[in-house]
Image (spheres, grey):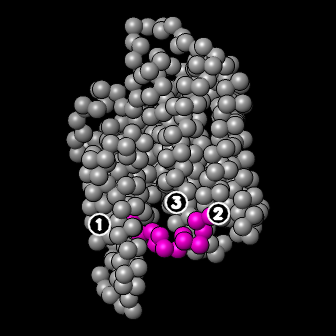
Amino acid sequence: MEMQDGVLRIDSFLAVTIGILVLFVGKRVNDGVRWLRELSIPEPVTGGLLFSLLFALLYAASGSVVEFELRARDVLLVYFFTTIGINARAADLLAGGRPFVILLVLTIGFMLAQNLTGISVAALFDLPSQVGVVGGTVSLIGGHGTTIAWAPTIAEEYGIANAMEIGIASATFGLILASLMGGPIARFLITRHGLTPPRPTSDEEVQEIGLSEQQQTAGIDHLNFLGSVLAIHVAIIVGYALNGVIAELGLRLPLFVTCLFAGILLTNLVPNRLYGALGIRWPTRTPAIALIADIALGTFLAMSLMSMQLWTLIDLAAPIFTMLAAQFALAVVVTVFVLFPLLGRNYDAAVVAAGFGGVTLGSTPTAMANMAAVTQRYGASHRAFIIVPLVSAFFIDIANALIIPFFLQSFG
C-alpha cells in the first residue's frame, strides 16, 4: 500500500482481505435492514456499495482516490464461471419440456430487444452504442457478475472509461425493479384470470428452493474440497487451450467464457470412469463445488463494487434512469402480453411470469424469491421451479457470451 499524488494504491493481497471484510459488513447490514433481505439484495452488493460510497465521500472531501490491485479478483471470476459449467447437466433439459423451450427462446429474443432498447436510449443522449449495451444485457439480464466481467474489456477496447460504474448502477437499480415487479404481475394475472394451482401429483406440495436438506447438512472434508478444486483447475486448463484456439480463428472471448464452456464439455462428454481412476467423483452439484462458487462470487463482487468510482456517474444520471425506465416498460409488456399467453395462460404461467421479471431485470435469486412469494400465497408450481432456474442460471450466461460481443462490434 502506497500513497502517491493523491492516489492510495492497495496491493492485491490487501485488496482480497478488504473484500472479505466488505462481504461481512454487507451481511451485517442486510441482517439489520429488513427491506434489503426482502428485495434479495446480495450481501456483497450491500457492502460493496457502502464502501464505494465512503470512498466517494473521501474523494469529495479531500480529492484523494483509493485504487485497488484486482488481479486476484479476476481469478475468482474464472473460478465462478467454471463452476457454472461444471454444474451443467444435459439431462436436465429433458425435464422442462415445451414450456422450457418457449421460455428459453423468448428470453433470448428479449435479450436482443433489451440491447436494442439500451442502444436507442444511448443514441437519444448522443452516447456511444456500447453504453446502451452496458445498460442492456450486460447489467440487467447479466447482473453484477456479468457487468464486472465485461466492464474492463468495454472500458479498454471501446473507450467507455466508466463502464463499470454505469453497469453496476444499472444492475443495482434493475435488481430493485425486478423485485418490485414480479409479485404484482403474478397477482394481477392470477386474479384477473381466476387461476388456481394444479393438483399435486405427490404428497409433497412444498416447493424446495436451492440445496436439498441433505446437501445443506452434508459435511465437506479436505478431499471433497480438493477434488472440486482439482476439477476446476482441469477445466480452467482446458479453457485456456480453448481460448487460444478461438483466438487463432479471429474471435476474442474473455477467459471466463471459454472456461465456462470447458466445464460443460468435461461434465457432459468425458466418461465418469476416467475420474474414478483417481478415486474421485466429478463434483457436479456437490456441496463442495457450491461452497467454492459462493466464496468466489461473493468475494469477487465485494472487491469489484468497493473499487467503483461513483463520482464518474454524475453526468450520466439522466441517461441511466431513462434507460432503466424503458427497460422496465419493455419487461412488463413482454411478460404480460407475450410470455403469459405463450405459456398457456394458466397458474404455472403466472408463476413463471413472476420469475421472468427477476430474470430480465435482476438475477436468478431474485427470480426465485419472486416465485417463492407467489407460491407461498397461492400454491406450489413445480414446473416453474424447474424451467426458470434452467434458463436463468445457465443458458443466459451462454447466450450473453455470444450476444454481448456481437452488439459491441456490430453497433460500434
Q: Earlier in the sequence, mark 2 or mark 1?
A: 1
Q: Which residue is mark 3?
A: 169
In the rendered image, residue 316 lying in the magenta stretch gets the answer: yes
- Residue at 29 percent of width and 52 percent of height: 29
Magenta span: chief secondary structure: helix
Q: Which secondary structure, mark 3?
A: helix
Amino acid, disc 1: Ile
Q: CA distance from mark 1 to mark 3?
A: 22 Å
- Residue 8 seen from this side: yes
Q: Which residue is mark 2?
A: 319
Which one is in front, 397 or 45?
A: 45
Amino acid, disc 2: Pro
Q: Which secondary structure, mark 2?
A: helix
- Residue 151 seen from this side: no
In x, y percent, where is residue 22?
30, 60
Where's the N terminus, which quadrant? Answer: bottom left
- Residue at 32 percent of width and 37 percent of height: 287
